[in-house]
Image (tube, helix red, strand yellow):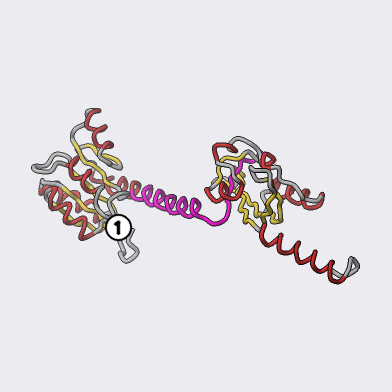
C-alpha cells in the first residue's frame, strides 16, 4: 500500500456501469478507496496515473478483454507484482488457466457476492503485501555482505546465500542436506562448545569465532552469530547463522604478535 494514502486504492475495470457502481459501493463500505475504468484502454491509463494497490478486472469487455489488459498491466512500471483479480462468469477450466497464464493473482466468479467482496479483496491484498515483504527480505539476504546459513534443528543445512559461496567455495547444491560439520568447523574450546550447544538446545543466542576449511583446503576465520527461528506457536523450527569473514583481521593480529615477540622476546606481554 502506498504510505501516502490513508486507504488502499482499488481500480475497478468493467464496461457495465451497474457492475462498477455495485463494486464501488461494496468496496467503499469495506474501507477502500475506488477509481474506475470502463474499458481496457482506460484501465491502462488509469493504472499508470493512480498506481492502485489492487485491480479488479472484468474479463469480457469490448476492445481489450480482461486477459489482454492483465497481460499489458504486467509490463507496466509497478505492475509486475501488483495483485490483479479477474472477475468472470466463465467458469470453465480453460478460462481459469488462461487467467493465470496472463499473470492474474486470483479470480472471482459471477454473480459476485457483494456483501463479502471487500473481505475477499482485503485477504488478497494482505497476502500480496506479505509476498512483497518476502521479496524484499529475499533481496536483502541474497545480496548481504555477510554469510547467511539456515539449518534445521539438527544442524542440517537448508540454505546458504551467495556470500557464503564466495567465502567458502561451496555452492548451496553441494552442502544442502549436510550438517555444519561438513565445513570442518573447529577451534571451539570445551567451554565455548558447551555454550553453543546450550544455546541451540534452548533457542538462545550464541556468538563466537570459528575456523572453517575452504573448499580448496585453506582455513579461514569467521565471527558467527547463531539464533533460533520460531513458528507461530513458539516452537523452534530452524537456526540462522550469520558469519562474517575476519581472516584478514586474524592474520594481521597474528603478524603483530609475531613481530612483537621478535622485537621484545618471548617473555613480553601479548
The residue singled out by tag 1 in the image is 8
How far across and down, in percent of the image, does residue 85 sit? Answer: 26, 44
Relative vertical location of residue 17 with respect to residue 5 in this rendering, above or below = above
Task: Count how many numbered circles sit on residues in the image.
Answer: 1
Relative vertical location of residue 155 with respect to residue 228 in this rendering, above or below = above
Relative vertical location of residue 107 with respect to residue 77 in this rendering, above or below = above
Task: Indicate the secondary structure of the residue bearing disc 1.
Answer: loop
Task: Give whichever of 149, 83 is nearer the camera.
Answer: 149
Q: Which residues lie in the magenta part?
A: 125-154
Task: Give whichever of 39, 158 is nearer the camera.
Answer: 158
How far across and down, in percent of the image, does residue 201 sit? Answer: 71, 45
Is residue 235 among what the camera can see? no
Residue 109: say if magenta. no
Does residue 158 appear left or right of residue 87 in this picture?
A: right
Does residue 141 appear left or right of residue 236 in this picture?
A: left
Q: Residue furthest top?
A: 93
Q: Which quarter of the picture shows residue 1?
A: bottom left
Does residue 81 appear left or right of residue 212 in this picture?
A: left
Residue at the image point whose x is 27% and y is 51% from the top: 79
How far across and down, in percent of the image, does residue 42 sit? Answer: 13, 53
Does residue 127 appear left or right of residue 35 in this picture?
A: right
How far across and down, in percent of the image, does residue 171 sit? Answer: 55, 41
Look at the image and tell me in which quarter the C terminus lies.
bottom right
Q: Residue furthest right?
A: 267
Residue at the image point whose x is 80% and y is 51% from the top: 189
Task: Give whichever of 148, 104 is nearer the camera.
Answer: 148
Task: Give whichever of 189, 6 is nearer the camera.
Answer: 189
Q: How would you classify the magenta stretch by its main secondary structure?
A: helix
Residue 136: say if magenta. yes
Is residue 236 among what the camera can see? yes
Amino acid at each position: 500500500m502506498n504510505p501516502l494514502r490513508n486507504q488502499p486504492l482499488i481500480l475497478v475495470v468493467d464496461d457495465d456501469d451497474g457492475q462498477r457502481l455495485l463494486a464501488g459501493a461494496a468496496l467503499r463500505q469495506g474501507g477502500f478507496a475506488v477509481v474506475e475504468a470502463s474499458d481496457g484502454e482506460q484501465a491502462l491509463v488509469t493504472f499508470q496515473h493512480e498506481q492502485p494497490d489492487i485491480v479488479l478486472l472484468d474479463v469480457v469487455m469490448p476492445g481489450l478483454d480482461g486477459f489482454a489488459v492483465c497481460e499489458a498491466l504486467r509490463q507496466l512500471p509497478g505492475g509486475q507484482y501488483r495483485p490483479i483479480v479477474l472477475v468472470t462468469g466463465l467458469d470453465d477450466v480453460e478460462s481459469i488457466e488462461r487467467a493465470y497464464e496472463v499473470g492474474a493473482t486470483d479470480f472471482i466468479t459471477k454473480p459476485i457476492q457483494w456483501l463479502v467482496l471487500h473481505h475477499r479483496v482485503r485477504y488478497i491484498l494482505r497476502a500480496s503485501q506479505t509476498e512483497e515483504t518476502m521479496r524484499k527480505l529475499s533481496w536483502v539476504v541474497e545480496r548481504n555482505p555477510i554469510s547467511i546459513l539456515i539449518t534445521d534443528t539438527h544442524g542440517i543445512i537448508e540454505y546458504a546465500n551467495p556470500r557464503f559461496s564466495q567465502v567458502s567455495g561451496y555452492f548451496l547444491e553441494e552442502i544442502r542436506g549436510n550438517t555444519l560439520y561438513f565445513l570442518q568447523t573447529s577451534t571451539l574450546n570445551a567451554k565455548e562448545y558447551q555454550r553453543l550447544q546450550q544455546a541451540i538446545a534452548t533457542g538462545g543466542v550464541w556468538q563466537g569465532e570459528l575456523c572453517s576449511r575452504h573448499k580448496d583446503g585453506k582455513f579461514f576465520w569467521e565471527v558467527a552469530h547463531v539464533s533460533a527461528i520460531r513458528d507461530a506457536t513458539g516452537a523452534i523450527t530452524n537456526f540462522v547463522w550469520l558469519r562474517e569473514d575476519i581472516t584478514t583481521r586474524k592474520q594481521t593480529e597474528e603478524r603483530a604478535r609475531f613481530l612483537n615477540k621478535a622485537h621484545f622476546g618471548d617473555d613480553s606481554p601479548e
